[in-house]
Amino acid sequence: MTRIAVDAMSGDSGPRTVVRALASLIKNHPDVDFQLVGDAEILRREIAHSRLKGSTRIEVCPASQVIAMNESPAQALRSKRDSSMHVAINRLRTGAADAVVSAGNTGALMAMGKVFLRTLPGVDRPAIATFLPSQNGRVLMLDLGANVDCHAEHLLQFAVMGSVLFQQVTGTVAPRVGLLNIGSEEIKGNELVKAAGSLLRASHLNFIGNVEGSDIYGGQCDVVVCDGFVGNVALKTSEGLAAMIRNELRHMYSGSLYGRLAYLINRPILQKLRRRLDSRQYNGATLIGLNGIVIKSHGNADRYAFARAVEVAIAEARQGLTAEIAKVIQEGLAQAIRSSA
Amino acid sequence: MTRIAVDAMSGDSGPRTVVRALASLIKNHPDVDFQLVGDAEILRREIAHSRLKGSTRIEVCPASQVIAMNESPAQALRSKRDSSMHVAINRLRTGAADAVVSAGNTGALMAMGKVFLRTLPGVDRPAIATFLPSQNGRVLMLDLGANVDCHAEHLLQFAVMGSVLFQQVTGTVAPRVGLLNIGSEEIKGNELVKAAGSLLRASHLNFIGNVEGSDIYGGQCDVVVCDGFVGNVALKTSEGLAAMIRNELRHMYSGSLYGRLAYLINRPILQKLRRRLDSRQYNGATLIGLNGIVIKSHGNADRYAFARAVEVAIAEARQGLTAEIAKVIQEGLAQAIRSSA
């Protein structure tokens, strides 16, 4: 059985959303045990009112505290030893769970991961990685916000980790790695990416060189590497543009009788487009580089979005990703560092 | 009359595209004289084959050289004294033109602007600014790539210049200025934006604080300030996502007979959406902070896109923007620096 520990209390949506997300998944994942971490009374009540009622694959793990979304990681680490996030991470640390999902405070989740799980050997800084849609399928992008001030060596490590994760999840051998930059020529970019470019060119990775923002969705590469500030801006800019387009379509169609009729005829296609633009379905980012599978959900994830994050955790746990990643990352980093030395 | 000098040789599209762009504009702008800078023979031939034939408002200004798109700015400055870009900038410098439009090498254009026009007093570094669509109308974003390694003071100057440009173009008093960051809290971000945040909070600007990538198109603010690396990535990421969406819609509609029929009925709405997603109509970025109006067009602009860039030049020239901006920027920077000192 695959065992997924779910932080049911953190985030903005609350335990009811989490319980309903699991209820929507349990039938399709007969080989998964779910561990719901949080206020036992609340969780048992929610379970009793859900399709999880009576399931033998649901365990409630009590935790008396919750880490607030705006709480400082240091504060969370010091004073919240019985928080749902901490208890969930602990189950991973002790081997009672194969993966953790939390919609909580990213900084606190990363800090707990570093302190209680530790980073994989050879990794200075874990990163946040997520799959995005691209014209030929999917692209993995990292870092998305864990590391806002990076050195070139960190970007090299992100590239190695992302390369492994992409290969593990998609089966693609030697995924094409691109360095996010503002031009394709080697001389382009700021000091950080210029230095990272030389490390990547010297590495064993299938490095295709600089890619621009317009290439993220273009399908030219499989893994896009950037520092956490740039990656976070690129991701959220995309979400904002997609939201604007959805709103404009709604106005265009509701603006006239013609539009409303046209909508009826186009509903199937427009719904396909809406799904494609729906950031909820890409919910579930991997905190890669930690010694354990930790998946971060959007703080305001609804039932549908949270379920997607849990499915990411299930997929990575089934493949026993961490051990494999640890191995390959060590080799990879060793090679990369040798060849770039 | 408003006099627009157009670099007709630089960029990927060539003089024919430029001539046809002007031909599409000349009728609607009876108070504008166009100065076509480049190879006189080629230009006269193109004009003779266009609607510009016989117009008294078209002047050909000979220039024997062209700056290549991949040429280094230093090289361009040294060895191309008779390039179309240089001759066009010179007409602006000598007062023979009120604004310049070029689709050429951005680095060379900025370098020539700095050397031959100089920056406005109080401005360390000119920036590239462009208007983008937002849910409530338009948003001005800068820098988009001129300055990849910035200090906090530069971001403050961008904010002041952007604020003035937005007010001049839209008439909005005290536009809302946002600092592009990865979270709304003051503690969020990298060292650069944290330092810039304190300068902006101390300034006289209508600073609304940090904005995230998702807010660029959200209409929460009028001016988005960031360094040139981040701005360039955000802009190109948006273009890439818009391109992906256009392709997907095309596939969805052409994929089936149903789709093709549905398309016929939806064409008006979908064309409205396509226009809205069409980056060509936002073509024409202002090199702000120079002592003259210099508009940069996309290198691969087609006739439609290039015409939009020329219209930006016309609008800014009509408002005699530079002088006014110079004045307000000096006051603005003075105040900003006083209050942040």
Image (tube, coloured by chain):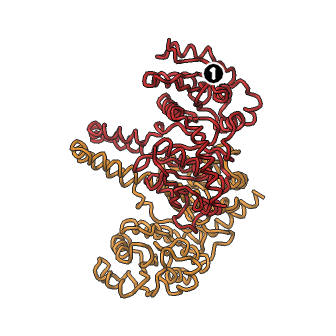
Chain colours: A orange, B red
Q: Nearer the viewer, residue B85 or A224?
A: B85
Residue sitting at x 49%, y 75%:
A100
Q: Quadrant of residue B108?
A: top right
In this rendering, position of residue A168 left or right of residue A304: right
Answer yes or no: is residue A206 visible.
no
Residue sitting at x 36%, y 76%:
A19
Q: Which amino acid is tagged 1? A: Gly
In this rendering, position of residue A30 left or right of residue A71: left
Secondary structure of the residue carrying tag 1 is strand
Q: Nearer the viewer, residue B65 or A210?
A: B65
Q: Position of residue A293 (x, y in %)?
A: 53, 72
Residue ID for mark 1:
B38
Residue sitting at x 45%, y 25%:
B29
Total marks placed: 1
Q: Nearer the viewer, residue B328 or A79?
A: B328
Q: Position of residue B66 (x, y in %)?
A: 67, 26
Q: Is residue B126 above or below residue A284?
A: above
Q: Position of residue A169 (x, y in %)?
A: 52, 61
Q: Is residue A80 above or below residue A12?
A: below
Q: Chain of mark 1?
A: B
- Which quadrant: the C terminus of chain B? bottom right
Q: Position of residue A166 (x, y in %)?
A: 55, 59
Answer yes or no: is residue A75 visible.
yes
Q: Nearer the viewer, residue A289 or A54?
A: A289
Q: Residues within 10 Å of mark 1 (few under 14, many from 20)?
A: many
Q: Quadrant of residue A126?
A: bottom right
In this rendering, position of residue A121 left or right of residue B318: right
